[in-house]
Amino acid sequence: VDGVIIMDVREDDKRIEAAVDAGIPAVLFGYTDYPHGLTMIDSDYESEAAHIVSHLAERGIRETILFLQSKKVFRNRLGFAIRFRDAFLLE
């Protein structure tokens, strides 16, 4: 292969180091604290969560529930879900 896109990046994703060790050009679709020098493409989930909470609060909403497809996103330590949830709960 000429390169890979590593998707659904976990906080402790072993695929990142494996790609770097193999010398395969790679881009991360997601965020990790340890990108090993690879380019990361991601969204600002913290800002989006704050915006959503503000939007709901302006409309008088006082309680919300976050629905997920699966609890696996947290068990698998998927960064986007953790960052969004943490920022949402801070607001």
Image: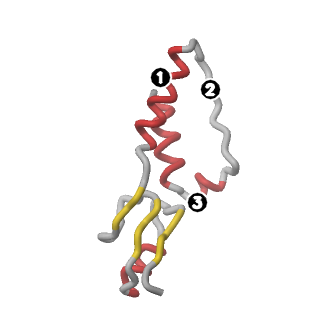
Instruction: Using the image as rendered, state which of residue 44 and residue 65 is in the foreground.
Output: 44
Residue type at mark 1 is: Ser
Q: Residue furthest front?
A: 2
Name the element at disc 3.
Answer: loop
Residue 64 drawn above or below residue 2: above
Q: Is residue 4 above or below residue 79?
A: below
Of circles 1 and 2, which is in front? 1
Secondary structure at badge 2 equals loop
The one of 17 and 5 positioned closer to us in this rendering: 5
Residue at image location 51% in from the left, 29% down from the top:
52
Residue 11, percent from left and from top: 46, 60
Q: Quadrant of residue 59?
A: top right
Instruction: Characterize the local packing of mark 3: few (<14), some (14-19) or many (20 or more) Cα atoms within 10 angstroms.
Output: some
Q: Would you call the spot at circle 2 few (<14 residues within 10 Å), some (14-19), or many (20 or more)?
A: few
Foreground tag (2 vs 3): 2
- Extreme-right residue of the structure: 69
Question: What residue is shown with label 2?
Answer: 64
Residue that appears at 48% across and 54% down: 79
Q: Is residue 79 above or below residue 4?
A: above
Mark earlier in primary sequence (1, 2): 1
Cα–Cα span, label 2 and label 3: 24 Å
State the residue position of label 1. 54
Residue 76: numbered disc: 3
Q: Is residue 77 above or below residue 3?
A: above
